[in-house]
Image (cartoon, grey):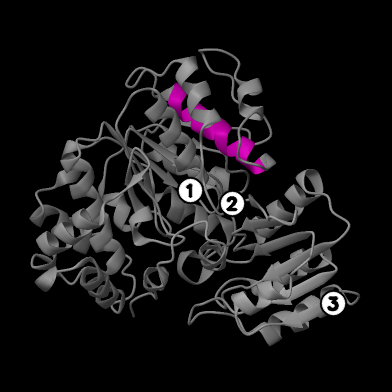
Amino acid sequence: MTYAETIQFLYGLNLFGANFGLDPTRKLAALAGNPQDRLRFIHVAGTNGKGSTCAILESIYRAAGLRVGLFTSPHLVSFRERIQVDRQLIPEADVVRLVEELRLANHENAATLFEFTTVMALKYFAGQACDLVIWETGLGGRLDATNIVVPLASVITNIGLDHQQWLGDTLEKIAAEKAGIIKPGIPVLTAAESPALEVIATLARQKNAPLTQVNPLLCVESSMAALSDLVESLPLAGDHQTANAALALATVNVLQALIPVSEVACRAGLASVSWPGRLQLIRQPDGGQILLDGAHNLAGAEVLSRALAKYFPADKRTLVLGILQDKDWQLICRQLAPLAGKIIVVPVASSRTARPAELAEVCRAAHPAAKIILAGTLQTGLAQTAGDPFVVVTGSLYLVGEALELFGVSPARNPERGLNEWRPQT
């Protein structure tokens, strides 16, 4: 198979949708030799901040000299972003090899794309002799394919309303699904607040799992030193990233006996962390600025609002907005529309996109004075921002990925962005 043919095979798996349950993943992992048994993991779940927390943990442990695997989703541009070792994307040749090795085993198992990719990652990380794997859940936790591992620590960033159609319609129900990653006797760390915190604490007690709550408003105090000054120097913008860094540092501290990390390594890791598509600022040759942020739910939109007020004050903002239909797009529009005098609504390159006309109607009601423009594509929408001093592209990570391609920040891989599409099995 060529790499292009391999991507097409993965598209075929996507037709099966998303399966909530662990049996297919366990069966495929067993056929692959249970590579997870040869690896150590930090398992990360939560509504927002999972990817950023994973990136911070990866950077710290890599700075400490470990060979670190990183498994995240969705990808912004290339499928290979999902599986990285020492922040190097899995090579195309290894994607081809792993797919060829697993596809025959999967013939009767009928694993979905995420389950298949999960086992691909396990095989790759084991083959690369990773010392530690930073392991992000896909959706939820309890029935997520990633939950076949037994980690060194379980991390739950926060709990908000998202994916209610699959995880439950209350914070307590969503928390119960996310807290499904808690394992007997394994430390749990969270920045979640009430009422979700009580659910997490109850499950932790039931499984005799030591619980550490990290106050998202305070920097963590470690046994190594007070690192609040270090957290403040984090290159990722936004107060929410300070909370993510505090949670990551608390995790490092809890695991000191198993994986010692010096203060010097913590400083180096935090100073060099990178996580694209989250308050990512692109400076244009003409002096204009474009901010990319994948605020894809109400909590993310609220974080973006606060970050704009604190870090990017501007009298003249242009908002380029595209949201998926299965998100709380009306609430997101109401939160973001008042932030800009000019709003360009665009479709997300997805079958799940909300219609720009619907977005425009809600934005107009939320901010009657704004100039609102409908565009048929992101590219044509961005053309309407020529000469605008400050442009915010937001509403979906899929939209941010497309923007990264259009701005030439990431190489174009249009056929691969579509692998983020999924639907639950019925």
Task: Identify residue for label 2.
Answer: 278
Q: Is residue 153 left or right of residue 336?
A: left
Residue at x-position 55% and y-position 79%:
353
Task: Identify residue for label 3.
Answer: 371
Residue at x-position 18% and y-position 61%:
96
Q: CA distance from mark 3 to mark 1?
A: 34 Å
Tell me if residue 231 comes above or below residue 46 in the rendering: above
Task: Identify residue for label 1.
Answer: 51
Q: CA distance from mark 1 to mark 2?
A: 10 Å
Q: Earlier in the sequence, mark 1 or mark 2?
A: 1
Q: Crowding at label 2, few (<14), some or many (≥20) Cα neighbours within 10 Å?
A: many
Q: Residue 28 location, x and y as percent?
A: 15, 59
Q: Crowding at label 3, few (<14), some or many (≥20) Cα neighbours within 10 Å?
A: some
Asked whether residue 248 is drawn in magenta, I would say: yes
Residue at x-position 74% and y-position 69%:
386
**The quarter of the displayed image where residue 395 is located:** bottom right
Q: Nearer the viewer, residue 411 or 103?
A: 411
**The quarter of the displayed image where residue 14 is located:** bottom left
From this viewpoint, is residue 21 visible? Answer: no
Q: Residue 184 location, x and y as percent?
A: 32, 37
Between tags 3 and 1, which lies in front? 3
Q: Residue 235 location, x and y as percent?
A: 61, 36
Q: Is residue 419 left or right of residue 122?
A: right
Marks 1 & 2, CB-CB < 8 Å contact = yes
Q: SS for tag 1? A: helix
Q: Amino acid at mark 1?
A: Gly
